[in-house]
Structures are given as structure tokens and as C-alpha cells.
Amino acid sequence: MLLRQSQKRRWRPTGKATEPVTSRLRSLCLALLCATLLLSKLSTTAGAAEQFALDGHTMGTTYHIVVTGSTEALPTGRTPQTVQREIEAALQQIDQQMSTWRDDSELARFNASRSSDWFAVSRPVAVVVAEALRIAELSDGAFDPTVGPLVRLWSFGSTPRERKLPDQQEIEAALSHLGWRKVDVRHDPPALRKSDPLIELDLSAIAKGYGVDVVSDRLVELGLPHHLVEIGGEVRARGRKSDGSAWRAGIQRPDSDLGVLTAAIELTNRSLATSGDYRNYFEAAGQRYSHTIDPQTGRPIEHNVASVSIVADSCMVADALATAINVLGPDRGLPLAAELHAESLLLLRTADGFQERRSQNFPAEIGASPPQPEPESSPLLRTMLAAGVLIGLAIAGMAVGVIFSNRRIQGSCGGLANMPGAEHSPCELCTKPAEECPNKAAQVAASSASPPSEPLADPED
């Protein structure tokens, strides 16, 4: 039943409850209108999310960072420039701790020491060395942080050297002073110890990933949980882009120009690291020699793995695991990735190009061009529609209240008239009294003779 203003008679409700009902309705509409304006403002602000980017040089390579969020959301007193300075200070500290390219780093001083006693280091160095030894154990030595002397011997280290093939005697001499089991780590207080005074540590295959994790954690501490961090090709993605979509990362096609991708994947709260033989290698007598050294043979890897890409929670783990699987090859490497809850994509060289070997859960490719988002209605329009529905429901509810307050119900009797404490009997309130009501005929006749003083909707309607 719908109450509305009749074209024949103007609806003029009477009674003491009319004015409070109208006043409450006006107040409710005003409140809903204010809420609509506030929600539209919030929706407009949320829909206009911003991004800012930071980039620079570190660890002999470059870094790139993209942060989702307005610069106004930064903690008080911080700007993108001050955030970048904090990040570069953290990266500089890692370089000071773990670089093999500078003589004053903690790692270089440990390598130069000929003592077998505990050597005090910073806590980050102890953390990274401990993780390196863990991956070494799990990979049965395929990843070995003591491989530095062999890397230098094959002309890939920090010391400039003519690129020529070492002889077997030199290789065996270097192998005699290798072995991850000859290194111990202590966390409290942080220190390293080596049983062979000539043992050296090289963290190049894990330190960049650790640096990515440090930068990502620092951004979270600054209240910037949505970001993408990349250092020298190692990537960690957290949260979402400004449009709400997942971050995208590309995997370069081996032996191609930079920017030519073999795959593009989406990353959300995951890390990606790639190890390959196509960036750092040399050729001699028609043979390619990769910078990835097999610690078991003392020689560069000789199988047909061109690149290994690992997706894991920690970029430090992904970085080290990519190197380990690059040494192990697909048959032994894929089970190791599964054991560490990581996904892997291997590209194998064949006579016809490259063959893929990927773990079951490796992220699906998204193609060269990103999918187009479904068209969405304006946040303001959605808010106004929602508010309109609320106002309509409120008006309908108030109208029902007016009906019930009039207490005259057309149709069968019952409802409010039969509720406990009702002031009138059903026979008094019903326009169609039951058979048992006295004077039924008189009531019906009176009802048809003159319209009620508080009319309802017109019968014609």
C-alpha cells in the first residue's frame, strides 16, 4: 500500500505524531546527505592514489624503487628525498659490511685474517653468512660462500686479471682451501670463525637479495607497505600498484638485448631472482665459460642451463637459490626449490633455441601487454547511488511508521490492534469488521457514507 498525495484530495495527516515524524525524516535526510558528501570525498581521494619512484647506484649496480601512495602520507618531516637518503644509507652500510670489492669491509678484513679465532662482525653479516651456510647444506655444497678464490682464478672476481684458462694444478690448489663446512657463525655476540686460515667468504650471490629485503622492510617501517624494490635484477614486491593491480616483473630472454623478455609475471608479496650465464662470461677456443663456478669441480658449469629464475618470499633466499640451482641443473635443482617452498623457471639451451622447465606453481605468464581492466563506474557515482538507496529506504520506513501510527488498517483485522496493551479492539479499528463484531452493518454503512478523516491512497490508484 502506497501513501502519496492524491490529485482529488490533498493528504493532510493530523495528530500529534505528524510533526515529530516529519522532523525526524528531515534530520535523517540531512545526515545522509552529509554522509554522502563525506564518502564521495573519501572515494575521490582513494581513487587518486599516487606513486613516486627512487633510483640510484649501489653494490656496483643500480637500484630502482616504486612506492604506491601519496607523498602526503609519509611520516611527519619525511619527503621522498629524505626516504631515499635513508635507503641509500642502509645500502651503503651493507656494502661496508659485505663487499669483496673494498679492502675496508668487514668481510674483506675477515678474509685477510689468518686467525682461527672468533672474528667479531656486525649482526647483519652473521645473519647473511648463516643463511648462506644453510643453503650450502641443503644444496649439498652447490651453493658455497667460500668459492671466492675459484671465482678470481677464472677472472670473474674483484681483482683484475687477464681472462685465460687456469691449469688443473691451479684449480686443485684453490679447491684445497674451499669448503663451507670450514666456517662457523655465532649470533650472540655476532662473530665468524674459520678452521682453515686461508678460507675466504664471498657473499656476492646472496648480498644483493639481502639488500632488497632490507630496503623493503625499511619502507614498511616508514608506513609505505605497497612498493617494488629492485637491485641489480633482484626484485621484491609488496602490496599493490596505485591502480590496485599486482606488480609485474619481467624475466630477460638469454642472449638478447636488455628489455627483451622471455616471460612476464605478476608478483604480490613475493621476490624474484635470476641467475644466468648470459651476462658475465667469456669465450676461449670456441667455448663459453660462465661466471657460475661449480664448487665440486672447480670449473664453470658445463650443462645447458642458460638461466634460473626463482620466486620465493625472501629475496635473499631467492638470490642464493637461483645460484644453487644454476649449479645443480634441472633434475636436482627443481626438488630443492620445492623443499624451500620456492617456484622455479629454468631455460635450457637447445639446438632450436630454449626449452622451459618450470615448477608446477611458478606464476603464470601475463604476456607482453598487461590485461585491460574492466571499466568501472566512478567512485562518486557509486557513492551517490548507495546514498540514494539509503535515503529511499529511510523515507519508505518513515512512511510505514506514519501508516501504523494512524492505526486504521484496510483489509483483514489483527496486527497492531491485537497487540497487548492496544487501546482499541479490532472491531473499532478495522474497516472490514469480522462477523462476530456487533453492529457490523452499521459500521460498514458508516464507512461507505463518508470518507475517513485521514484518507489513504485513492482507490483508483
Image: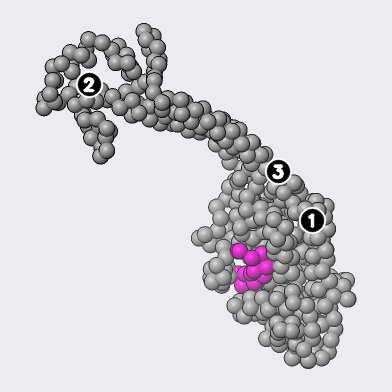
SS at badge 1? helix
Of callouts 2 and 1, the N-terminal one: 1
Q: Main secondary structure of the magenta part?
A: helix
Inter-mark Cα distance, 3 to 2: 65 Å
Inter-mark Cα distance, 2 to 1: 77 Å
Of callouts 1 and 3, the N-terminal one: 3
**In screen coordinates, is 456 left or right of 44?**
left
User: Looking at the picture, which amino acid does disc 1 mark?
Assistant: Val
Inter-mark Cα distance, 1 to 3: 16 Å
User: Looking at the picture, which amino acid does disc 3 mark?
Assistant: Glu
Q: Residue at x 20, y 14 (%)?
A: 446
In the image, is residue 24 above or below residue 314?
Answer: above
| Number of numbered markers | 3
Which of 302/325 is in front?
Answer: 325
Q: What stretch is highlighted in magenta?
A: 312-329
In the image, is residue 81 above or below residue 17?
Answer: below
Label 2, on which residue? 431
Residue 313 percent location from the top left of the image:
61, 64
**In screen coordinates, is 390 left or right of 319?**
left
Which of 174/158 is in front?
Answer: 158
Of callouts 3 and 2, the N-terminal one: 3
- Which residue reaches farthest left? 436
Q: Is residue 161 visible?
A: no
SS at badge 3? loop
SS at badge 2? loop
Question: Do the residues bearing badges 3 and 2 touch, measured as CB atoms within 8 Å?
Answer: no
Q: Residue at x 78, y 91 (%)?
A: 117
**In screen coordinates, is 118 left or right of 311?**
right
Label 1, on which residue? 83
Quadrant where the N terminus sits is top left
Label at residue 50: 3
Label at residue 118: none
